[in-house]
Image (cartoon, rainbow, N blue to C red):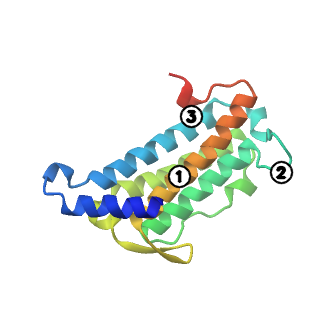
Amino acid sequence: MIRRLLMIAAGAALIAPSAAQAQAVSQSLQGLYETTRNNVLASARMLDEELYSYRPTDEVRSMGELFGHIANAQYTFCSAAAGQQSPATENFEQSRTTKAALVEALEMGFGYCDDVFENLTDTRGAASVQFFGGANTVFGVLAFNSAHNYEHYGNLVTYMRLNGIVPPSSMQ
């Protein structure tokens, strides 16, 4: 579904005559990504250290493991979108357990994606790349990244609410 919507949006952007719309799709995807990035980072920074080991049941990731997983994913998705080998040198979900180390991992992962978005154009976004064993567009990969971030931010929101904490997206 996301892939189909992105293809429609990309097609519309490519035929739009207005110069003001020239970067419409890439800017929209960047805005979506920045919202997910900001909410995840704000969550990681606001939580007390002891909540990083919190998990509502034994079958699910802890908050810290979720943050590590999200940091890893930034390298997976954004390196594919950039057509590069991932520069990640560790599995943050397994190697980092403290708040400071996980916040640093998130900052590094999101920083890498920030750089990828800096170089994104609608022309580049419509290009085909290999991802998870098949062809996709750069736009598709980056949209998947934001969807993945939101999926796990939703986990974090639930964990925070179970602990009486208002998540960053609801603070206003």
Where in the figure is residue 49, as x and y percent of width and height?
74, 33
Where in the figure is residue 104, as x and y percent of width and height?
60, 45
Task: Compute the Cα span from label 2 to label 3.
Answer: 25 Å
Residue 102 horizontal side relative to residue 147, left or right: right
Q: Is residue 120 above or below residue 27?
A: below
Q: Is residue 96 above or below residue 53?
A: below
- For the point 45% across and 48% down, the residue is 33
Which residue is more in the foreground, 15 or 129? 15
Mark carried by residue 112 = none
Task: Answer whether residue 24 is visible to the viewer in this image.
Answer: yes
Residue under pointer 3:
42
N-terminal of the pair, mark 1 or mark 3, is 3
Residue under pointer 1:
147
Q: What secondary structure is marked by label 2?
A: loop
Task: Compute the Cα span from label 1 to label 2.
Answer: 22 Å
Residue under pointer 2:
59
- Contact between marks 1 and 3 (CB within 8 A): the answer is no
Residue that sits furthest to the right in the current view: 58
* Kind of residue indicated by mark 3: Ala
* Count of numbered marks: 3
Task: Answer whether residue 120 is visible to the viewer in this image.
Answer: no
- For the point 54% across and 46% down, the residue is 107
Q: Is residue 115 above or below residue 79?
A: above
N-terminal of the pair, mark 1 or mark 2, is 2
Task: Compute the Cα span from label 1 to label 3.
Answer: 18 Å
* Kind of residue indicated by mark 1: Ala
Q: Nearer the viewer, mark 1 or mark 3?
A: 1
Where in the figure is residue 80, as x and y percent of width and height?
48, 68
